[in-house]
Structure formats: structure tokens, C-alpha cells
Image: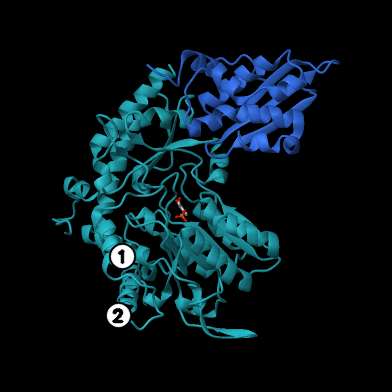
Chain colours: A blue, B cyan
Amino acid sequence: MDDLYREQIIDRYKNPQMRGRLDPHDYTYEDDNPLCGDRIRIDLRVDDEGRINEAAFSGDGCAISQAAADLLTERVVGMSLEEVKSYTKDELIEMLGIDLGPVRMKCALLSLKVLKAGVYGLDELEEELASL
Amino acid sequence: MATPQTNNTLDVGAIRKDFPILGREIKEGVPLVYLDSAASSQKPSQVIHAMSRFYETEYANVHRGIHTLAEEATAAFESAREKVARFVGAESPRQLIFTRNATEAINLVAHSWGRANLQDGDRVLLTQMEHHSNIVPWQMLAAELGFTIDYAPMTEDHRIDLERYGQMLEQGPKLVGFTQMSNVLGTINPVARMTEMAHGAGAVVLVDGAQSVPHMAVNVAELDVDFLVFSAHKMCGPTGIGALYGRRELLEEMPPFMGGGEMIKRVQFDSFTVTELPSKFEAGTPPIAQAVGFGAAVDYISNLGMPAIRQHEQEMIERALDQLEEVPGVRIYGPAAEHKGAVAAFTLSDAHPHDIAEILDRRGVAVRAGHHCAMPLHEKLGLPATTRASFYLYNTSDEIDSLIEGLYDVKKVFA
Ligand SMILES: Cc1ncc(COP(=O)(O)O)c(C=O)c1O
């Protein structure tokens, strides 16, 4: 019936694979989308070579934000921090496979913003993060 | 032009014809079902036309010219003030200050009355059901002046806990501020009673009428409140204008809020003298056409009759709550229908309010999702967000049916 609420999105929302907390962690960050109250935290563990070997997300929010966070945290396991830096919002949107209007775009991109701010800090990626 | 009125009931069919936007479709074959009037109401053509007619025939700046247009515009502006003042039962139009909205009116009181009267060690008493606009201005001022803010709690059924409120008054707050109607729970607070109690404790009382003034008869003299704030845009009027009613002695004593033209009697290079009420609080060119629209809005709803509007909304909320309760998984927040206005905030199983609003929109049903500018209240409820359907004089029971059908769509998606 639905373009936005594809099976993958609903399934990830109801049965997330990556939900949880990592304690201790090497990186953690939390942010929210004040417009609709979506809130996401991402924890990462990184190996000696700077590759993410564990990732988890927590928080609450709409199906789009939570499914995107679940897919993104799954995707980044095995990536180097450099690769995280160059991972683009278009790649995330493509992975979600849905058409998003400007409001829902914010929901979808919240996890990417949290991920990048967690790894690189708000200052370094200020321009890019402001556009998410 | 005015909608004819019979008895004490609304002719909703005729009223809907006054609101051009209610005739539109959200997409092909899907009519608009507007259930978001608590955020902002729609506007009847009587208001829209009053404003365009004013621009087309009488517009000029007010209070500053001696040409014909300036006089006509000033007369129209001041006549709007009289209408709004009379509408809330103010003794004199001079006690009715035009502001940008309810929020600015609260900020005016905080900056002017608050700065002159509050200091370190003082207390301000609010309630747990306030909108951010009646919390943040006080928090900003408290950070500067060092007074303490307390929040009167609610009962289990989301009404003000009068016993605890009474106890908190014993701590001697200088100002008590509360909403007459919660924009989330719909709770209608017993303003006269709460004001009497607060006055007994020596406090000044500010009432947030943003959600009550549009929906029920509110009379400052009967309620005996010191300040009342409200916004035109929630009561069929335009955006950009709201009002502050104040007790005359308080307004007279208060220092001005903003400085500029209009609020002065005389300016020299090293000093100024402040002019009289209400101009003292209206620095700069005011929202002139908006005031005209505000006056037309007050005419429109007064003509329908506030008791009739309240009666209609009472029927709507009773019906809405009954039907919502029958949807499995729905949980409603707020007191029973007889204690509330036409606002229904709810959750539906584990569907997020944002997703609910999105799916309802496909049926043309416009509701609001989120914390509705009441984050502390949602924290108290233990919820990040709710979905809110709100009703006004133009809503019908068919529209409640559309809402309910939409909720079954949501359940299908999240089954
Ligand atoms: C209870 C309450 N108070 C204050 C306000 C603020 O109104 P405005 O945004 O028009 O200043 C609102 C509007 O949402 C409200 O519902």
C-alpha cells in the first residue's frame, strides 16, 4: 500500500537488529530532532586499525528515524573512520529506498548526523552537519 | 454577510461555507479534514475581506497623520481594540495592549512587571501543564534575577491538584501563572477559584488564554485576573497580532517594554518621557490591518455566540473521545470530556505520533504530532510525543469518522 512505509522500514522499526548500548565504547553521541521529538544515540567500538567492529543505537522516534538508525549502524560495522567521514546522505537515502519529503528527510538523516558528530565532533564537520 | 443564528446551536453547514479553505482538497478526491485548530484556526472570508478591504480603502499609518486616511486607519485600529477589549470584558480599551501574539504578551509581563517586582529569593508559581511560552520567559528571567519557579502538580486524571496548589501558595509566590485550558490535555482550569486563592496569598495572577479565549466566554472582570494573554490566530483572526489585558493599576506602574516611536510623550537627546496606556507598551508601527482582522474575528465568533461554540465543541469532544476509546491500542490523555475543551491527545500502540500524522494526512486529516510545545508536561506523562486532534466551530462528526478510519489505516501499516 505504501511508498514510505515499505516492509523493510516497518520491519526494522519493529524488530531492530542493532538496538542497544555499548559500554564501554570508543565513541558515543546523542542528538534529537526537536520538531518531532526523535532522539538517537549511537555507540561505537573501534579496533586497533581504526575500523568499527561494533555499533549500536538507542533512542526513540518515528519509524523512519529508527529504521534509518538501525540500517546505518549495521552498515558501518567494518568501515574505517575515514569511510564513515566520506559516507554521504545520498548513500543513506539510497539504502533506505524510500522517497522522502523535507520533513521526513530530517528524521532519516538524524542518525547520520549523530554518527558523524560522534566520530568527528560538531566543529570539524560543521558545514556538512548543518545541512543534514 | 454575518451568519444567521438560531437558538443556541451552530449551523455548522453554513459556517463551513464562510471558510474558503475548508472547501479544498489535499489531493484529487481527498477533502481537507482540519483537526489542528489548537495550533492555529482557519479564517472566515469575513476576516479575510475585512483586511483586504482595509488595505484597499483605508490604509495608512496610525496615530501620526492628520490626513483623511491616517484618521480613518486610526479609527479602524482603535475600534478593533475596543471590540477585543469588550470581548474579554475589559473595563477600558486602554487596558488592552496589542502584541504580536500570546507569547509576546507573556514576555512583556515578564520583562516589564517581572523585572520591576521580582528578585532573588522570590517565587513564581506555574503549573505542570503550561505551554513553553508560559515557562521559558520566566526561566530566562529567573536565570538573571535569581528567583525560584515552582510548578503546581496535576491529579491522576490530569486536572490541577488544588490541594497541592493551595499548599504551594503558602510559600508566598509573587506571581502565579497558569493556562485556562491546556493545549495538550484539554483540561479547563477553574480560573476564578485559582485566582481567588492566589490573591488570598498576595500573588499577581497571569492567565494564559491562548486556548480558552477562542472557545468559550472569558470575562476578566468575573474571573478577577490581573493579566490575560491570547492570540488572534487561534480565534479565526490573522497571525501577527495578540493581546495583553492588564489590571489598570498594574499597567500604569509598569515600566515600558520596548522603546521607540509611539510609546513616548517626549524625547530629548538625554532622556524620554513615556506616554499613556495603551501606547506605552506599543513601540513602533503596530500590526494595523491585523488589528482590523482581529476585530472582525471577534465580531464573527461573538455573532455565533461563545456559549453556542462551547456547546458544539463539547459535543464534538464527547463524540471524539467515545470513538477513540473504541479503537484498540488508543490511549487518551487528559480528563473526562466534561472537564475539557475540544482537544484530544492520544497514543496508538507503538506507532509513533509522527507516523500516525503522516498516514492520517493521506486521508486529508490534519492533526499535530509531537510535544506541542509542552515538553515538561510530556516528560511528566512519560512520553516523548503524542498525536493531537483538536476541534473548532467548523468541525463535524463526519470528520471524527475520518480520523477514526485513518487510525485503522495506521494499524494496518504497523500491524
Ligand atoms: C496554551 C498556549 N499558550 C500559549 C501559546 C502561544 O501562542 P502563540 O504562539 O500564538 O504566541 C499557545 C499556542 O500554541 C498555547 O496553546
Query: Which sits in the foreground, B273 or B318?
Result: B273
Q: Residue at x 13, y 55 (%)?
A: B6
Q: Are marks 2 and 1 on the same chain?
A: yes
Name which of mark 2 and mark 1 comes first in the sequence.
1
Instruction: Answer left or right for A125 relative to A110.
Output: right
Amino acid, disc 2:
Thr
Q: Assign a secondary structure to mark 2.
A: helix
Snapshot quadrant of residue B147: bottom right
Which residue carries the number 1 mark? B55
Residue projecting furthest to the right: A48
Q: Report if the CB atoms under discs 2 and 1 are less than 8 Å apart.
A: no
Q: Is residue A122 visible?
A: yes
Instruction: Answer left or right for B83 relative to B168.
Output: left
Which residue carries the number 2 mark? B68
Amino acid, disc 1:
Tyr
Q: CA distance from mark 2 to mark 1?
A: 14 Å
Name the chain letter of the residue that bears numbered label 1: B
In the picture, the disc for residue B154 is none
Query: Which sits in the foreground, A116 or A70?
Result: A116
Q: Is residue B327 visible?
A: no
Name the chain letter of the residue that bears numbered label 2: B
Q: Position of residue B292 (x, y in %)?
A: 32, 66
Q: Position of residue B84 (x, y in %)?
A: 34, 67
Instruction: Answer left or right for A107 relative to B3.
Output: right
Q: Residue at x 42, y 59 (%)?
A: B240
How packed mark 1 is, by other alpha carbons closer than 10 Å (few <14, some 14-19, many 20 or more), is some
